Image: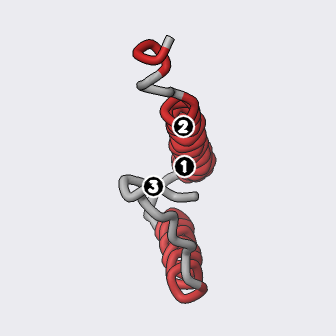
Amino acid sequence: MSSPNEVPQTATTAAFFLQAAIAFAVSLATACVGILYLPIDPWQRGFLAITLLFLTSSTFTLAKVVRDRQELTTVRARIDEARVDKLIAEHDPFNRVAG
């Protein structure tokens, strides 16, 4: 049962996913083409290519860490909320008055 304070999770639409994938592919491809056509030495071009590879892999890692932290917080918040709901449901305010 959901509470009024709970923020609903919305799924990513297929159009948004496609737009993000296309934007990533275009930006990576244009960066690669730019590195290939720069008027620089091959070792400088290699350095830029490795930097681009490291930047891309770091971006994926950061996105995964941020997502995992958000999911952990959401699960923890739901567990805490369920515990409080259980305590409230089991609490009998008239228990001490009657006894």
Compared to residue 60, the image places residue 78 above or below, namely above
Q: Nearer the viewer, mark 3 or mark 1?
A: 3
Label 1 Cα crowd, 10 Å radius (few <14 / some 14-19 / many 20+): few
Kind of residue sitting beneath label 3 = Ser
Taking the spot 45% from the left edge, 13% from the top edge, the residue there is 96
> Mark 2 packing: few (<14 Cα in 10 Å), some, or many (20+)?
few
Name which residue type carries label 2: Ala
Name the residue carrying label 1. Answer: 63
Give x and y (percent) for residue 21. 58, 76
Q: Which residue is mark 2?
A: 89
Task: Identify which residue is drawn at 57% across, 38% down.
Answer: 82
Q: Secondary structure at mark 2?
A: helix
As helix, strand or loop, the secondary structure at mark 3 comes to loop
Return the mark for residue 3.
3
Q: Nearer the viewer, mark 2 or mark 1?
A: 2
Determine the residue positioned at 61% across, 46% down: 64
